[in-house]
Image: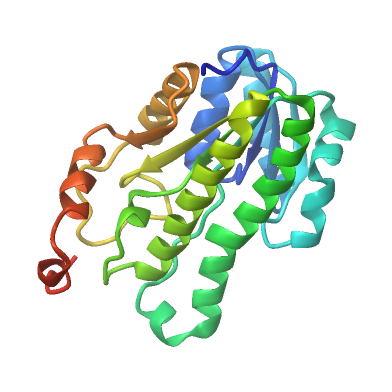
Amino acid sequence: MKPSKTSRALILGARSEIAQALAHQLASEGVGLVLGARRCQSLQPVADDLRLRHQVDVDLLEFDALDLDAHASLADRVRDLAGPWELVVCVVGTLPDPVRSRSSSQEAAVALMTNFTGVSVCLGQLANDLEKRQEGGIICLTSVAGDRGRQSNYVYGAAKGGLNVFLQGLRNRLVSAKVHVMTVKPGFVDTPMTRGMPGLFLVAAPEAVARDIVGAWHKGRNVLYTPWFWRWILFIIRWIPEPIFKRMSL
């Protein structure tokens, strides 16, 4: 099922470089935007640039993935601010320090809450609104880290793996309402979240990832690995037998 044309998109986690690359990609197609983030007023220069460069409407919305009580009214808040909307693009996420997350319950809890609980609760509420209207769709970024638990980042991977399953169920639920859900699994992307980390390879530019995502959305893809070669890398990793895999340093 190919998604219908979008006139306005809500981008959550809009402070990230991937989110802003996606904002430019969508705006270049004439899509109006609502940028949701904590301290959203800091995004005013980004909004001004989008308006000037692409001649589209851009609004700012205060949004915190961990404010679970606020998610039930989010769809109405977007409508009150900017009018009708059809597409949700969720780029919310945080990368915990893997060593601290083993010893700090707070570090682990924030990573799990931000990357899984907050996102899932929020998208579940927005999905209810889209289902009632029987239009639109959801694009949500998870990570290749969610495909198999590895010692180097298993707290983060567990959250993203749970989100993958949540999106799979949501896609199954909403197809009859003509609401499309696309899961995006990026590999390493050159952003402040990953910059300077040891051992990175095959690092992609945010702009290239954004082009991949929007192109796949127009084609009605269900799951996208970006860049494309991560599909085959993870295919191999998933099929390594557990007795061997557990002894590997990944």
Q: Please give left or right for residue 240 compared with residue 194 in the image.
A: left
Q: As drawn, is 85 to the left or to the right of 239?
A: right
Vertical comparison of 176 with 243: above or below: above
Q: Residue at x 50, y 53 (%)?
A: 163
* Horizontal arrangement in the rendering, residue 158 relative to residue 249 (left or right): right
Quarter of the picture holding the C terminus: bottom left
Q: Is any atom of residue 125 visible in this view?
A: yes
Residue 24: name its quadrant.
Answer: top right
Q: Position of residue 91 (x, y in %)?
A: 54, 44
Quadrant of residue 246 within the rendered picture: bottom left
The location of residue 218, given as percent across then percent down, is 49, 17
Q: Position of residue 201 (x, y in %)?
A: 19, 48
Q: Is residue 179 visible?
A: no
Q: Looking at the image, which is closer to me, 156 or 188? A: 156
Q: Residue furthest bottom?
A: 103
Q: Residue at x 68, y 47 (%)?
A: 124
Indicate left or right for 162 with 8 as reference.
Answer: left
- Tell me the residue at 78%/36% (across/down): 129
Does residue 49 sit above or below 14 in this rendering? above
Q: Where residue 117 sits in the image (x, y, percent)?
A: 61, 61
Indicate the quadrant where residue 102 lies. bottom left
Compared with 6, 196 (above or below) is: below
